[in-house]
Image (spheres, coloured by chain):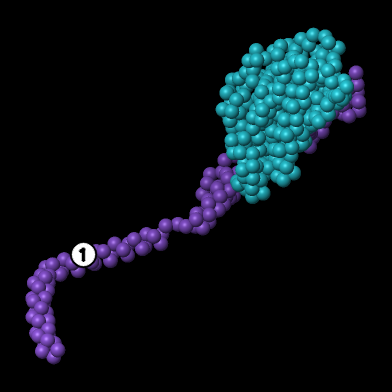
Amino acid sequence: MPTKKRDASLFDAQKFAGSLAGLLDALPSEANRKETVSQLQQLIEFLGNLKSRLECIPTQQDALAARAAVDRLSALFSEAKSNPALGIAVGIKATPSSRKAPTITTEEIEHSKLAIARFESLPIDEIRVALERMPTRNLQAVASALGIRTTQRTGRDSLVHQVATKITNTRGYRSLRDGADEH
Amino acid sequence: MTAKVIAFINYKGGVAKTTTTYHVGCSLAQHFGKKVLLVDIDPQTNLTFLCSSIEDWEQFKKKTGTIATMYRRFLEKKSLDTKRFIWRQPVGAGLKRRIPNLDLIPCDIDLIGEDLGGAAVAGSFPALELLRSQSREYLREHSFLQKALNEVDDNYDYILIDCPPNLYLMTQNALVVSQWYVVTAIPDHLSTIGLNILQRKVRTIGEHLQSAQTFAGKSGLGVASIGGIVFVRVRLGGSRITIVHQNTMQAVRAEQGANKCFTARTTELIGYGEAAEYSLPVWMTQTPNAAAAAKKHEYEDVAKEFLQRFP
């Protein structure tokens, strides 16, 4: 058994030397080593970039927050359009407010109430004709006296319709309520 | 029948049936060039008042009559002469630009007594011993609108019927003459729990009609199929639909089937009420709130989808 053991050791040493020679042959040249190190460096940089980009991708939570911010911004811009002071603050030229109705004086409203009282006794077609003959300013005053909200863009045609409908419908509802509609 | 006949129903009140019938009708006529006849069978007369001022309606009623007059003529077995009762282009009558191709058969409060008469309530049916004779009468009572609209349906693309918030005789008539019925619903708990009951009741009305036809030895009458559910008066929080309404709409879509529900919907806007005051659709009413509502084009979207569903 001991002899056999020694033989095996000798055999192993030879094999080791052979392997070592093979390994030495397989070692890279200086150029190869430099190239490999360089490629490894590039790979590290690539992975570093990838990591940074992944960190930049928004999550669903980020998207919700962004949407809320956009909604708030949109509301602010809408408000700024009709609010000159706010518009200047955020750098938006405020457009004239569509809600702004012409200013009617108290005297004009009182005068309009008299006209409305006269209309009360007229049939709807005659009210329309009378309103169509009115100057626009007076028509706007009548609308205002009736509590009709208008804009500067409300045309004469619409004003006449709204005033006539308001007067006759008020009268009509009163008539229905009082049972004058019985037949 | 040339025209497509669609009834807007829901036995629950305040669910924008009339506003929807009106705006869809106006949009079909004005934006899509369709010939439309609106039929008001709700004695509250709200569709009629959306189309005209009260005084114009009173004049028309005195001169011509309303659907209540037609129904009395029907009961008296006189000819209906439906064409005579059609109010041509009433919307925007006081304006230079009235809506073309949109006519109306107006209603009045007198229909309320008539509507409750006879075998009116859904679920009731003539006693067995009187079946044959009563079945004939039952069928006749249910064919009033069919008879009336058959006289004029060749002149229209669409006939839209605004039903009262019940399932009494007039609504049953509407279901008989219509090919489809559309249900309007606010997406909240109370407004949507009745959707299944409503559809079941409509099926029951159909079954009663079928039985009556069997006993009377007649055929040909049936009830409309469901054409869709439109969500109306959807509440917004800012620019988004509130969670409660979103959840209810999702639940209804899941239960009823997504196809049954219109994608287009309308929201709760002051402008609709403001426009109603002047008997005009929102896009023709020049007041601040109506103008804001008009910008959303909600009813145009519903009308567009309506055309896709009932081409």
Picture coordinates of residue A154, whole percent (x, y): 66, 30
- Where residue A6 sits, quadrant-wise, is bottom left
Q: Which residue reaches farthest bottom?
A: A2
Image colour assigned to chain B: cyan
Q: Nearer the viewer, residue B57 or B131?
A: B131
Residue B179 seen anywhere in this rendered image of the structure:
yes
User: Which image quarter is the C terminus of chain A in?
Assistant: top right
Picture coordinates of residue B152, whole percent (x, y): 69, 13
Picture coordinates of residue A59, whole percent (x, y): 47, 57
Q: Residue at x 71, y 11 (%)?
A: B151
- Where residue B268 sits, quadrant-wise, is top right
Q: Is residue B4 above or below residue A53?
A: above
Q: Nearer the viewer, residue B9 or B44?
A: B9
Amino acid type shown at disc 1 = Gln
Q: Is residue B139 above or below residue B225?
A: above
The residue that mark 1 highlights is A39
Lateral position of residue A35 relative to residue B182, left or right: left
Q: Nearer the viewer, residue A156 or B100?
A: B100
User: Which image quarter is the N terminus of chain A in?
Assistant: bottom left
Image colour assigned to chain A: purple
Specify few, some or many for label 1: CA neighbours under 10 Å numbering under 14, 14-19, or 20 or more: few
Residue B299 seen anywhere in this rendered image of the structure:
no
How many discs mark residues in the rendered view?
A: 1
Q: Residue at x 69, y 35 (%)?
A: B184
Q: Residue at x 66, y 38 (%)?
A: B231
Q: Residue at x 29, y 62 (%)?
A: A46
Element under label 1?
helix
Of all chains, the one bearing label 1 is: A
Q: Is residue A70 above or below residue B299?
A: below
Picture coordinates of residue B103, whole percent (x, y): 69, 18
Q: Is residue B74 above or below residue A60?
A: above
